[in-house]
Amino acid sequence: MATIDDRQTATARPPLTGADVLVESLLRHGVEVIFAYPGGASMPMHQALTRYRDKIRTILPRHEQGGIFAAEGYARATGKPGVVMATSGPGALNLVTGLADAKMDSLPIIAITGQVPTKVIGTDAFQETPMVEVCRAITKHHYLVQDARDLPRIVKEAFHLASTGRPGPVLIDIPKDIQNTALTNPDFDVPMDLPGYRLPQPPAPETIAEIVAAIKASKRPIIYCGGGAVASNASAEVREFVQKTGIPIATTLQGLGAIPSDHYLSLGMLGMHGTVYSNYAINEADLLLALGVRFDDRVTGKLSEFAKHGRIVHVDIDASEINKNKAAHIAVNSDLGDVLRALNQVVEPGDWRDWYQQIDAWRESDPMAYDQRDDAIMPQYIIDQFSELARGQFIMATGVGQHQMWAAQWTRFDRPRTWITSGGLGSMGFGLPAAMGAQAGCPNTLVVDIDGDGSLLMNIQELATVYSARACR
């Protein structure tokens, strides 16, 4: 029971503003770092952040796009939602590319934008942009806050939506008057209100039995493993499945790190820029185990010709991806980790010796190689040597372009969440700020950015952020 002194203290405590409630809600959801660029419509939130400076580190990017790319790097490296803040109008619009990028690559992002006061929304007020309408198709969900009392619930829902199921970006657009609203005794434990959001159920036993039967009947199986393995934190289960079954595995660009690059059963990256032998194996396989993938065009090429000789098992947590590009013979809409844990209890190693011999012959006839030159140091050589020296103890970010493909092809990854690149959207300018965000999330890890001149120049102003952030530590 509260004492008289407790009640007097509670009564005497000044009310919190909506901005204070927002920042307190972020703190309660474990936020330690926020990338935030100030402006008129977001100033109350920045002022609130100063009152929590001992608990939440605010990093000032030099451009809002740099801020959201940094939040993506943070999210990919740590597995936790990345948080970014910008003001209304042009500031908020500078987040749009990053929101689309995070949506394509399934990264949990909380994007908070200031908005003009409620009473002038829709009047073309100074620096007004209808961010919810702009971002409707490139976010997992979006909110225009209309009552300051809703802030704790909205933040709670945003983190739940961003980090569960198929991860993705959530936008919270907050008018300035909402930020300045005084609130007494805000309820931070308010229940969520998400009647239409349902996570997929664990796989049914009969589905697991059907997959096991397909594996036993196969002579030339292959695993096609994507970014879903990393996003669902199921890399350990993938490795166990490979070890128990002995099935060769090829990964997508975003699946790199799900299995060690030097594992005998690893065929490296497949697709347009992948190894020759991984593409041959996919083409000749009689069973394709597609785990956390979306049958992207950079992998499949002409869909009618991709993996046309075998059965397809497709496991994905996003129901919209099932049968979207390629029809599956066994479709499993469930969490990949749940599916693999169930499979790992019952699968047995198969006799794939003939299959191994064929793959080894392809490896020998078309190995990964590059020409050495006497008059220049080849970029592939540099990446290969870095990988050898660092021995997996690093996080690598890249820009977009040829250097990105060289890095994917020649870097040896030992563990997940060490490869940070813009895959689905292919956003130039991604590498430097993403590396910055990864370093903020993993301060004791070596972080390297492999970049091209075009990508580097697009967000080169973030070198100033890196310098100032180091100086402030």
Image: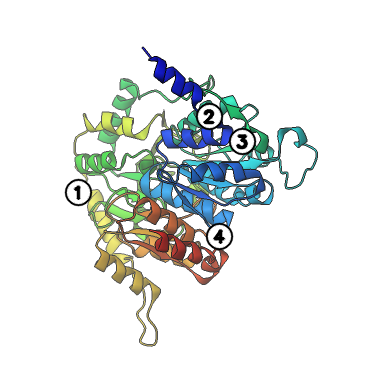
Q: Is residue 298 above or below residue 291?
A: below
Nearer the observer, disc 4 or disc 3? 3
Question: Depth check: 54 or 401 in front?
Answer: 54
- Residue 304 shows in this picture: no
Say what amino acid the circle numbered 4 marks. Answer: Arg
Residue 364: image location, x then y, percent: 27, 65
Mark 1 = which residue? 353
Residue at 31%, 66% (x, y): give it: 367
Mark 2 = which residue? 14
Q: Secondary structure at mark 2?
A: loop
Q: Are marks 3 and 1 in contact (CB under 8 Å)?
A: no
Q: Which mark is residue 179?
A: 3
Is 244 displayed left or right of 466 in the figure? Answer: left
Mark 4 = which residue? 62
Nearer the observer, disc 2 or disc 1? 2
Q: State the quadrant of the C terminus.
A: bottom left
Q: Secondary structure at mark 3?
A: helix
Q: Residue furthest top?
A: 1
Q: Earlier in the sequence, mark 4 or mark 1?
A: 4
Say what amino acid the circle numbered 1 marks. Answer: Arg
Residue 233: image location, x then y, percent: 33, 40
Question: Depth check: 374 or 270 in front?
Answer: 374
* Distance in Å between CA atoms under marks 2 and 3: 16 Å
* Distance in Å between CA atoms under marks 3 and 1: 65 Å
Q: Estimate how packed mark 4 is, as few (under 14), some (14 to 19) or many (20 or more) residues with alpha carbons within 10 Å.
A: some
Residue 232: image location, x then y, percent: 37, 38
